[in-house]
Amino acid sequence: MDLAYTEAEEEFRGRLREWLAAVLPGLPPKPSPDDWPARRAYDTAWQRMLYDAGYAGLHWPADAGGRGATPTQHLIFLEETEKAGAPYVGANFVGLLHAGPTIAAEGTAEQRARWLPPVLRGDEIWCQGFSEPDAGSDLAALRTRAVRDGDDYVVSGQKIWTSHAEVADWCELLVRTDPGAPKHRGISWLAMPMDAPGITVRPLRTLAGSTEFAEVFLDEVRVPVRNRVGAENDGWRVTMVTLSFERGTAFVGEVVACRRTLDALAAEARRNGRWDDAVLRRRLGRLNAEFRALWRLTQWNVGESERTGGVPGIGGSVFKLRYSGVRQELYEAAAEVLGAEGAFDLDREWALDRLSSLSYTIAAGTSQIQRNIVAERILGLPKGR
Amino acid sequence: MDFQLSDDQRALRSGMRDLLGAVFDRDRMRAAVERGGGVDRGLWRELGAAGLFALRLPEEAGGVGLGLPEAVLLFEEAGRALLPGPLVATHLAAGLVKGAAEGEAVVAVAEGAGRPVADLGDADAVLVAGGAEVLTGEALEAFAAGAVPVRSMDPLTPLHRVEGRWAGAGASEGRSAGAGASEAYPGALRREGALLTAAEQLGSATRTTEMAVQHAGAREQFGSLIGSFQAVKHLCADMLARTEPARSALYAAALTGDPVEIAAAKLLADEAAVRNARDCLQIHGGMGFTWEADVHLHLKRAWLRAARWLTAAEAEEILAADLGPVRPLYSGSAAGG
């Protein structure tokens, strides 16, 4: 058991720090959250810089165009980029963390050659077409139909909560290819070009007032059969591969950011006098313990995946469950530090973050679903009601 | 970085589990409950022979020469087995009190004003935590004379309330110390006491999770195993979600020895032990409220440990003091996504 980083890992960290220090000051200002074309341009430009510097797809296998970095190096990358205030993965999220790794693991040689390099270079971005109005937590209840017609699937249905849909080039789409099969079978995973005729994207306004995601209506959209990743009707298994990536390391940078927010909150409380309130002060102290523990748990999980050498384990569910709750507690404490005079001012970023923190116990599998996964798949309790 | 147990550490832990299974099985634990706790001298020597107390003494001093991470693993097992007696204090006194390392001496600890002293009746020496002063002989007798037995809520931990001139013992840091104590020792003593107590809490939290899962997978109601009900499942999942972050925090604190990390580990392990025991009791229903079920023993001990070495209030203040203005909020970083 060792928390010390190896010489090679420290060298990697040092080179990354130097590079970040050299490039970050020249970056343009961050675009407005509602300006999706500007956000796309900003995020893909950053991806291109990572690519040119050799940091794109760090955690992807080398034969998929990645750097084949160890989980620890990936952890260092996420830690250092966040600490340096580098741009977030942003619009490249689905391509880099979901679709790309899934295609790398399950795709054919042609599919890998077609889709992986543009993701790494920041040329193409992806969105996720999983959820439907009646298939959110019960994802396998999805109804979007794909009917084979020659070399194409003809797809009709509706997707929802689709982030980046307005500006995406591709959609990782789950469709029902065998309506007669039990609901977990009969599903296929398709790469759908977002400029195909029959696709209508309608932005949804979140409770934070922004357009983070969209509804996507599909009316007889033709998707070539060669765009199917994995076997027909085997999409559920392929999807589970995707979700294990999503729950693995997706929140590493955010834990670092939350700790920085907590430091800033303490500074603000000392400045405005609320630090003298022992209840609030102790609450911030407790949050310090939580974020320290989440960081150590991340290192523990990375250590585990380094040992097993594989896909991130279901231990990610424990992390996600705890993190999503603690993140909400952080912003509740922030509101108390700011007081009534500051907590409701939407021009202050932590007011917006308080609102967006509400999505964390819902998105990427609700806390209730995570608890079921932990109970059934880690603790071995029986399936059922 | 390899933040995982090494093969040696795994072997050490399973060796301790096997030993405790052999020398302190459930029958012996329940017998100890009926006795009202206290120290079984034979068992104490066996623990001494197994190296529990001498674990961190250098080999040239007759010790095992291992470190805090290994000690944490052993104390985790002790907590899991509900092993009674002043284990932490005797371990800390190894090298300071004659016979402690071998399990020949039983060493209790006086933590300071207002805190009850555990296992005083069996103690050959008392460690005064605030000054790393050791009381033996006449000093011990004088100390014990000012102590009044308390009817302890935890049947495995006899308690004394201390009155008179010893009531504030340990409250003031840096008092002149007895043999073997150094200037730096009082702080280290408190930190290590908190860390090892947190390890016992983690072991208890792990054990009550197992007990809850076991019961939920065996008990039928409404024609189904109660573990198939989401309400029960979610209690169990939350138990694991408390235990695992506490485990990572604890192991990291054992590696770094950092006071702030130790405070985080104690705070989270206390919470995991107490709340997991409560949830375990809830899952056991009416059975959980009986003397025969072991869960109340875990809960009572968890409450007691939470009040020892480093309380939640103290830990939270240490953790709050660690926070500070590192840089302006959100400087140049994108928080969206």
Image (cartoon, helix red, strand yellow):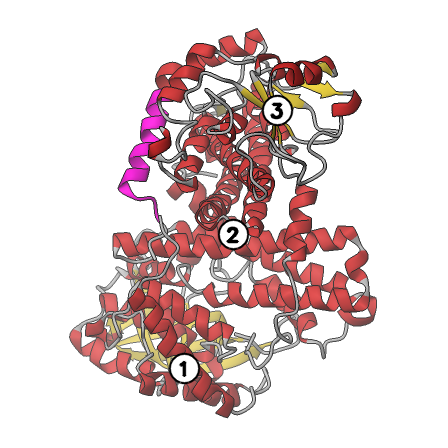
Depth check, mark 1 against mark 3: the one in front is 1
Question: Secondary structure beneath disc 3?
Answer: helix
Disc 3 vs disc 2: Cβ atoms closer than 8 Å? no
Question: Secondary structure beneath disc 2?
Answer: helix
Query: Residue tagged by mark 1?
Result: A18
For label 1, the crowd category at 10 Å Cα-Cα, with few meaning under 14, some 14 to 19 and many 20 or more, is few
Q: Quadrant of residue B231?
A: top right
Where A353 falls versus B227 (above or below)? below
Residue at coordinates 58% horizontally, 82% vertically from top-left?
A: A33
Q: Say the numbered circle drawn on residue A318.
A: none
Most foreground residue, B248 or A114: B248
Most foreground residue, A283 or A329: A283
The chain that hosts pointer 3 is B
Q: Say the numbered circle drawn on residue A293.
A: 2
The chain that hosts pointer 2 is A
Where B92 falls versus A352 (above or below)? above
Q: Say the numbered circle drawn on residue B300.
A: 3
Residue at coordinates 38% horizontally, 51% vertically from top-left?
A: A314
The chain that hosts pointer 1 is A
Where A179 falls versus B174 (above or below)? below
Q: Which residues are magenta?
A: B4-19
Residue at coordinates 43% horizontally, 48% vertically from top-left?
A: B255
Earlier-in-chain disc, 2 versus 1:
1
